[in-house]
Image (spheres, rainbow, N blue to C red):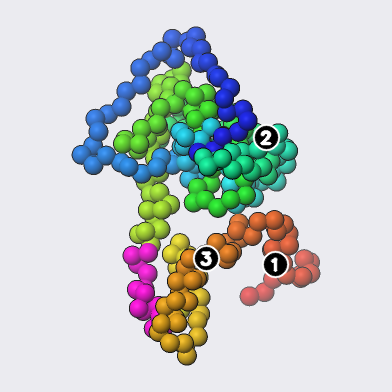
């Protein structure tokens, strides 16, 4: 749960159009109701950029965008970042300042009828923190959309003048995909025998080589240390926060007037 200094402002919804009074109905609950977090996709209207793994968080009063995703946005969009005016507070009471605030017009599209679209302006607080999500959609924006999420159905619904928008949660949550990937990985015994350790199950292709001359007990303890400290490694480019892209990228110093030859 994340809140800001503006979290206690009351917002009143005013329904003036007839379509805004249409009841929102949900289907019967399936035999195996969902208990997974609702993660959907949104589209940044200014650049048609799709935000995947957008977590619908009804406990959060602030819309959050994580730095690893913010760095992937086009430069013209990132240039809209402004200085924050208030700190963010977590459920334990600690406070932290976001990197900045970026205002984006977010479009949400019905899964079955692409003509059913609703857009709203979202003020994302960009934070430097690890998350399996790219962004969080808080309850204030859900109120602006008059949206109703249902965890047991695994979907979110809201009204538009053309009808009711229904967006299903992404089929595989990031944590579920990680568990499934872990099942395909070599067993712990096989890793220790080959001295190639998979410290982070989300990146099984990135193995860590350990000494073959170590005892089995030492190998086991070393493997546990690496697995419990995965946050100190940069597993992808986005983990290298604060490093400009032009410094992280490698370029060939070749004459552009020459024709490449295989």
Q: Which residue is mark 2?
A: 86
Residue 101 in sight in this render:
no
Q: Which residue is mark 3?
A: 229
Disc 2 secondary structure class: loop
Q: Nearer the viewer, residue 248 or 223?
A: 223
Q: In which quadrant of the rendered view does residue 23 lie?
A: top left
Sequence-earlier tag: 1 or 3: 3
Identify the main secondary structure in magenta.
helix
Sequence-earlier tag: 3 or 2: 2
> Which residue lies most toward the bottom here?
213
Q: Position of residue 48 (x, y in %)?
A: 58, 39
| Magenta highlight on residue 56 | no
User: Mark 1 or 3, which is nearer the eye?
Assistant: 3
Q: Position of residue 164 (x, y in %)?
A: 40, 23
Residue 220 as seen in the image, left or right of residue 133: left
Using the image, determine if residue 42 lies above or below residue 261: above
Q: Position of residue 100 (x, y in %)?
A: 68, 41
Number of other residues with Cα within 10 Å of mark 1, as a class: few under 14, some 14 to 19, many 20 or more:
few
Number of other residues with Cα within 10 Å of mark 3, as a class: few under 14, some 14 to 19, many 20 or more:
few
Circles 3, 2 touching at the beta carbon (< 8 Å): no
Disc 1 secondary structure class: loop
Which residue corresponds to the image point at 32% horizontal and 42% vertical from the top-left? 35
Q: Nearer the viewer, residue 87 or 157?
A: 87
Residues in magenta? 182-195
Using the image, determine if residue 107 lies above or below residue 22: below
Q: Which residue is mark 1?
A: 250
Residue 36 in sight in this render:
yes
| Magenta highlight on residue 189 | yes
């Amino acid at each position: 749960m994340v809140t800001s200094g503006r979290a206690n402002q009351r917002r009143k919804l005013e329904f003036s159009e007839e379509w805004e009074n249409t009841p929102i109905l949900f289907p019967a609950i399936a035999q195996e109701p969902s208990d997974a977090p609702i993660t959907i996709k949104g589209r940044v209207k200014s650049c048609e950029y799709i935000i995947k793994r957008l977590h619908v968080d009804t406990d959060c009063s602030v819309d959050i965008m994580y730095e690893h995703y913010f760095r992937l946005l086009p430069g013209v969009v990132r240039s809209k970042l402004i200085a924050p005016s208030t700190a963010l507070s977590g459920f334990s009471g600690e406070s932290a300042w976001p990197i900045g605030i970026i205002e984006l017009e977010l479009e949400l599209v019905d899964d079955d009828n692409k003509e059913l679209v609703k857009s709203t302006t979202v003020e994302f607080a960009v934070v430097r923190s690890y998350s399996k999500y790219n962004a969080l959609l808080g309850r204030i924006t859900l109120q602006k959309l008059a949206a109703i999420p249902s965890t047991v159905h695994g979907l979110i619904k809201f009204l538009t003048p053309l009808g009711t928008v229904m967006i299903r949660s992404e089929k595989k949550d990031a944590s579920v995909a990680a568990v499934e990937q872990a099942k395909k990985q070599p067993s712990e015994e096989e890793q220790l025998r080959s001295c190639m350790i998979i410290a982070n199950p989300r990146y099984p292709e990135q193995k860590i080589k350990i000494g073959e001359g170590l005892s089995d007990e030492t190998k086991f303890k070393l493997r546990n240390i690496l697995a419990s400290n995965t946050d100190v490694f940069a597993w992808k480019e986005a983990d290298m926060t604060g490093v400009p892209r032009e410094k992280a990228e490698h370029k060939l110093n070749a004459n552009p007037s020459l024709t490449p030859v295989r």
